[in-house]
Structure formats: C-alpha cells, structure tokens
Image (spheres, rainbow, N blue to C red):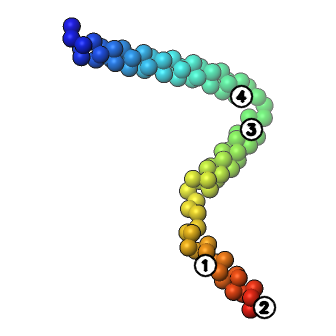
Amino acid sequence: MTREAGRRAGLDEQAVLLVAGLADVAVSTLGSAVGTLRGLLRRSDSAELAAQAENELMARGRLALDRYAAVPPAHLEILARHAQARKAADDV
C-alpha cells in the first residue's frame, strides 16, 4: 500500500467517524426534545406557554435582524452631521 492510499483511508475513516458522531448527537438531542415536548403537552397551560414562546421567538428574531442586518451609517455621513452640528452651535 502506498503512502497516498494510506492517507486517503485515514481521511475516509475520519469522515465516517465524524458523521457517526454527528448522527449520535442529533439522535440524542432529538430524543431529549421529544421527551420535553411530551412533558409540555401534558401541561394545562400549553396554549399560554405556546403564546409566550411565540412572542419570545419574535423578539429574538427582531434582535437578530437588528444585530446582523442593520447597516451602520457611513463614516462621511457621521462627519457631515458633526460638522453641521458645530456650525449650528457656532451660529447661535
């Protein structure tokens, strides 16, 4: 077996192990989520809880959009506003 073939086999094995590990994490997380969902469905205030969850998710969505989608003002625009404010202050 050549060195290149051995390296390739090692990479293939690593990829398989990584995928298997990710699958295991996904299955355990899904099992935990299903258990939590069953517990939530047994609650008497599930409608109220769902409404609160919806409001919280919407608030988190707004925060995420504000954080990542908002474009900061242009540097020259900020300088122009400062210059205009100074000029207005000097005129008074």
Relative to residue 59, is residue 35 depicted above or below?
above
> Which image quarter holds the N terminus?
top left
Q: How far separated are the C-alphas under marks 3 and 4? A: 9 Å
Dot placed on the residue nearer the N-terminal end, 2 or 4: 4
Q: Quadrant of residue 80?
A: bottom right
Furthest-bottom residue in this view: 91
Q: How far separated are the C-alphas under marks 2 and 4? A: 64 Å
Dot placed on the residue nearer the N-terminal end, 1 or 3: 3
Regarding mark 2 in the picture, which secondary structure is present there?
loop
Q: Which residue is painted at 58% across and 60% down in the image? A: 70
Furthest-front residue in this view: 90
The label nearer to you, 4 versus 1, is 1
Discs 3, 4 touching: Cβ within 8 Å: yes
Q: Which residue is painted at 61% across and 75% down in the image? A: 79
Q: Quadrant of residue 35?
A: top right
Observer-nearest of 51 and 27: 27
The residue that disc 3 covers is 49
Relative to residue 84, is residue 75 depicted above or below?
above
Dot placed on the residue nearer the N-terminal end, 2 or 1: 1
**Residue 39 image offset from top left, x and y in percent:** 71, 24
Furthest-left residue in this view: 2
Instruction: Residue type at mark 1: give it.
Output: Ala
Q: Which residue is painted at 74% across and 34% down in the image? A: 46
**Residue 71 image offset from top left, x and y in percent:** 56, 62
Residue 89 disc label: none
Dot placed on the residue nearer the N-terminal end, 2 or 3: 3
Dot placed on the residue nearer the N-terminal end, 3 or 4: 4
